[in-house]
Amino acid sequence: MHKILIASLKQSNQGWYEGFCAMAPQVSIDPNEIAYWPQVKDLNQVEYLAVWKPPHDICAQLPNLKAIFNLGAGVDHLLLDDSLPKHLPIVRIVDENLTRRMGEYILLQSLYHLRSMGKLRVAQHQKIWLNHYDPDAADVCIGIMGLGELGSHCAKLLHQLGFKTIGWSNSAKNIAGIDSYAGPAELEAFLGQTEILINLLPHTQATEKMVTYEFLGKLNHTGALGGASYIAAGRGKTHVEVDIARALRDGRLKSASMDVFEQEPLAQDSPLWGLDNLVLTPHNSATSDRKTVSLQILQQIANHRQGGALKNIVDLKRGY
Ligand code: NDP
Ligand code: OXD
């Protein structure tokens, strides 16, 4: 009987199913218990659902569901679905592999902007030997919005690399070497120092369209970097793309890296594609690893079946 159902985007549904089946024996779960949408025999038997952007209303068809597992870290796509049952636990991914990948992306992009790689690439195309001096990382302030699982890991890496590193979140944090700012009251003080702004916020009502042209105007534009840079890897709906394009054109932003967009895939006619001072990546800064994520979810299911508590449950009131 199918007790565990996977419902992901069409292109990854079967891949996740294969990942789950391969990992199941490690936690003594019979792979025959696993199915992927819509190839499931009896919807009444399903107890655990693993999803990424599932078909709308799927939960209404599963009367004996005990828990929903999100196949990624961000749950905005799920919480926006008003058919989602509010009484069931929703579990998100907190995974070392995913955290490490995000760390790689943020380091790569931070160094790209510190070392003026965009400018040097343009010079290379024009065969110009550009005499250029970059500032010391210790003189450049990086500010991370969102000091959760991903943001706090990135903050530690950036601090180790020598950047002056600060962070902003809902609640104050105590991370060695990182100055912590919290809540709306401390946002301006945070932005006023920040030269490279990293956005690792979840998409919630409170964060929607937060990063605007005006918001970017509050960054530190006169620091050692000689301007401000923006790196977005949380969610596209937390910023306003036309404002970012405008800021990149008129110099309010010196440069940017964007992995997340208001609509994905990014529309062919978006002005962002053509900007030399923007590094654009297709929402792949930290893709969920099939092996580690499948195993983690199956471990949670095995533990829950024995009466254990689920970990990493989403707080529906906060929305992340
Ligand atoms: P967490 O829930 O661990 O952290 C979220 C952080 O944001 C917390 O520090 C939280 O504050 C802060 N925060 C939330 N709302 C506000 C607000 N209104 N004002 C200030 N701070 C706020 O999430 P993760 O670190 O695991 O992931 C962050 C996001 O990254 C995900 O939600 C997802 O959207 C995105 N993501 C993108 C990926 C990609 O490939 N591009 C891959 C994986 C995730 P506090 O700590 O006080 O609660
Ligand atoms: C996630 C993502 O939230 O891949 O995990 O965006």
Image (cartoon, helix red, strand yellow):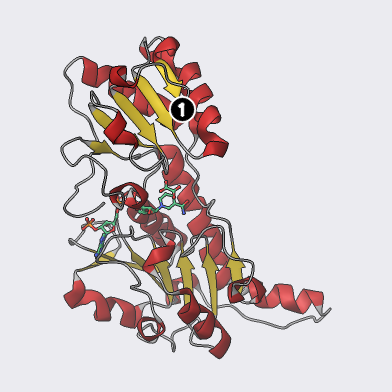
User: Residue at the location (33% across, 57% down)?
Assistant: 202
| Image label count | 1
- Which residue position holds label 1? 38
Q: Of 189 and 39, which appears nearest the observer?
A: 39
108 left or right of 320?
right
Report the front residue among 304 and 271: 271
Residue 282 spot, x, y in % from top left: 57, 56
Counting from the top left corner in percent of width and height, residue 153 is at: 37, 51
Quarter of the view holding residue 301: top left
In this view, the residue farthest toward the right is: 127
Crowding at dot 1, Cα within 10 Å, few <14 / some 14-19 / many 20+, comes out as few
In the displayed structure image, the side of residue 232 where residue 11 appears, left or right: right
Give the image quarter of residue 145.
bottom left
Q: Is residue 185 above or below residue 30?
A: below
Residue 103 is situated, as x and y percent measured from the top left of the image, at 46, 52
Q: Residue at x 24, y 66 (%)?
A: 206
**From the viewer's perspective, is residue 286 above or below residue 215?**
above
Picture residue at 19% right of the left edge, 48% below the top: 316
